[in-house]
Each structure stands twice: as structure tokens, then as C-alpha cells.
Amino acid sequence: MDEATLRTRLERIEALFAGAATAGERMAAGEARRRILERLGRLARDNPAIEFRFTLGDVWARRVFLALLRRYGLRPYRLRGQRHTTVMVRAPKRFVEETLWPEFQQLADTLTAYLHEVTERVVAAALHGDSSDAAEVSGPAGLE
């Protein structure tokens, strides 16, 4: 997968969560974002925002999540003393459950697959063609 393909996949994921009905709408990332923002606005009027705490140990997943929150006008924060893996946000529960979290999971999975593919390719080209896991042995030598 190249970077252009990755961007296209990420845009399609956003269009899916915006409820795009036609192929033209699916390709219009700007329109998808607008519809998600409208949904967030409706949900915010009907459902009060509550505080959510997310723990994201993977630095890449955390960056995707923070960018997604900011894309939708949500303000991520951490309380003093919380770990860097913690992300806090106030948002309507339905938006988080129906749109934000499922969209994030698909975006993170897509990006992780891309990063895995690039890492495998670079390691094979620069270091060694075999980057598979270490072999499993029965136990340390001399302790049997």
C-alpha cells in the first residue's frame, strides 16, 4: 500500500461513518466531515457531553485519536498527574459510541497495517530478509 492508497482508505472510513449514501458522497471527504460535525451538533443539543477517559498505549493510535478529536472540534486534555497514554474528552455518549470510537478503531487498524507493511519492507531491505519472530524453545539451557 502506498501513501495515496492509505489516504484514500482513511477518507472512505470517514465517509462510511458520515452515512454517505452514494459513491460520489463516499469520495467527498469534506462533505463527510461536515455531516459528522452536524451529527455531533445535534447530539450535543439532545445529549449532554460527559467526560470520557481513554488509555492509548500505542503512540501512533494516540496521535490518530487526538487528530480525530480535533478534527471534530473536540478538545482533548489530560489531568495533572495522568500518564501521557491517557486522553480525556467531553463529548455526547452517543457520538462517542456510534461514530468517534468505531471510526477511530477502523482508522487505527488501517494505519497500523500500513505501518506494519512499511516496517517489514524497510527491515527486509536494510537489515535482513527474515524479520519473523524468534523461535520458541523449551527452556533456558542448563536449567532443565
Image (cartoon, helix red, strand yellow):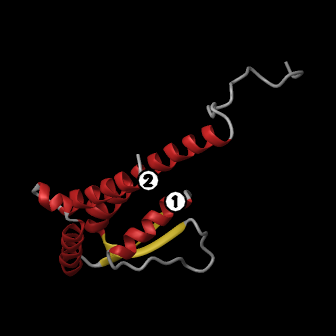
Percent across and percent down for residue 114 are 45, 48
Residue furthest left in the image: 22
Picture layout, residue 137 above or below residue 15: above
**Res 104 quadrant in image:** bottom left
The residue type indicated by label 2 comes to Leu
- The local secondary structure at tag 1 comes to helix
The residue labelled by disc 2 is: 111
The residue type indicated by label 1 comes to Trp
Along the line of sight, the residue nearer the viewer: 113 or 100: 113
In percent of the image, x 35 and y 51: which residue is there?
5
Picture layout, residue 8 above or below residue 135: below
**Res 28 quadrant in image:** bottom left
Position of the C terminus by quadrant: top right
Percent across and percent down for residue 130 are 63, 30
In percent of the image, x 32 and y 75: which residue is there?
72
Q: Quick check: can you spot residue 96?
A: yes
- How many C-alpha atoms fall within 10 Å of the one at disc 2: few (<14), some, or many (≥20)? some
Picture layout, residue 90 above or below residue 123: below
Along the line of sight, the residue nearer the viewer: 22 or 95: 22
- How many C-alpha atoms fall within 10 Å of the one at disc 1: few (<14), some, or many (≥20)? some
> 49 left or right of 23?
right
The residue labelled by disc 1 is: 60
Percent across and percent down for residue 66 are 45, 70
Mark 2 vs mark 1, CA separation in Å = 8 Å
**Dot 2 and dot 1 residues touching (CB under 8 Å):** yes
Residue furthest front in the image: 125
In percent of the image, x 20 and y 63: which residue is there?
18
- The local secondary structure at tag 2 comes to helix
